[in-house]
Amino acid sequence: MPIRIDNELPAKQSLEMENIFVMSNLRADTQDIRPLRIIILNLMPTKLETETQLLRLLSNSPLQVDIEFLQVATHKSKNVSKNHMDKFYQTFDEVQNKRYDGMIITGAPVEHLEFEEVDYWDELCRIMEWSKKNVYSTWYICWGAQAGLYYHYGVKKYPLKKKLFGVFPHFCLDDTHPLMRGIDDVYYAPHSRHTEIRRQDIAQVKDLQILSYSEDAGVHILADMDCRKFFVTGHSEYDRDTLAKEYYRDVEKGIDIEKPVNYFPNDDDKLVPKMIWRTTANLLFNNWLNYFVYQKTPYDLNNL
């Protein structure tokens, strides 16, 4: 949250130069405040776990946030009860006349397919098109980020020689960008994917800026120049044991899978992993909510 100070205070200029969020008394006195409206399109098969992970991060803020969940009607979830989906999730037909401050589109385990081969691709395209006028800022995660980049900008995904699996170091490319405020020069984030986007393709799109990068995991966070679309190729929302569960599941199925990189202590899969990405995850979601949703969305969403 911003600190409220007198506009004439000499410290104001210094703090702003250090990227500290300050607000003048004049602006604070004229601000309209209401709960933020966030809708989450949850495409993950582990619906309940993903709900908890995202809500934990969205709640770690003094802002009041109203959450709604969205499902695609053209795909039936196999790992969660119909009762749960009917009770807590809406379809696009039910929300298409509403407007939201923010939206999250999760990843999905469909990387092996071309985008157009995904059974709900047409519906997802309608949702992403709708979001341009009905959502102020959208946060895309993993496959969701690849899908968003492909739909909005024609950026392709490429298969990797082997699964990118583990917790990797990243470095910030623009520490003046509000999304990266408070992030360490080197920070860690989990990845679990079979495909990648390439830096040289992003460079051809003038409307996109790469905010962080990893020598091992590649492009991590991108933003459009209006800061209304953010694309994150990793899974900062993951719990301590999420990668472990994936690993044990694949081992049990007899799949040839390597241990997640930088994850198990001493690379011993019998030890409890250390969670070294929690702080970064909280900062990223707080910065998004504060700087690009709360501070930017019009008070009356009809004026979006």
Image (cartoon, rainbow, N blue to C red):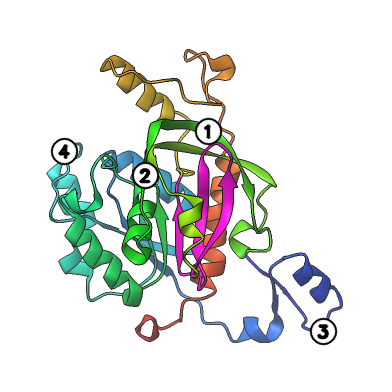
Q: Which mark is residue 167?
A: 1
Give the residue displayed 44% in from the left and 70% down from the top: 35
Mark pair 1, 2: CA separation: 20 Å
Q: Which residue type does callout 1 highlight?
A: Val
Separation of marks 4 and 2 at Cα, in angstroms? 27 Å
Please state the horizontal and vertical placement of residue 264, each as a whole percent of the image: 53, 21
Q: Which residue is mark 4?
A: 78
Give the extent of the magenta segment.
Answer: 207-233
Whether tag 3 and tag 2 are in contact, CB under 8 A, the answer is: no
| Marks 4 and 3 close (CB-CB < 8 Å) | no
Q: Nearer the viewer, mark 4 or mark 3?
A: 4
CB atoms of marks 4 and 1 within 8 Å: no
| Inter-mark Cα distance, 4 to 3 | 59 Å
Disc 3 target residue: 8
Asked if the stretch drawn in magenta spans residue 114, the answer is no
Type of secondary structure dominating the magenta stretch? strand
Residue 14 percent coordinates (x, y): 83, 71
Residue 62 shows in the view: no
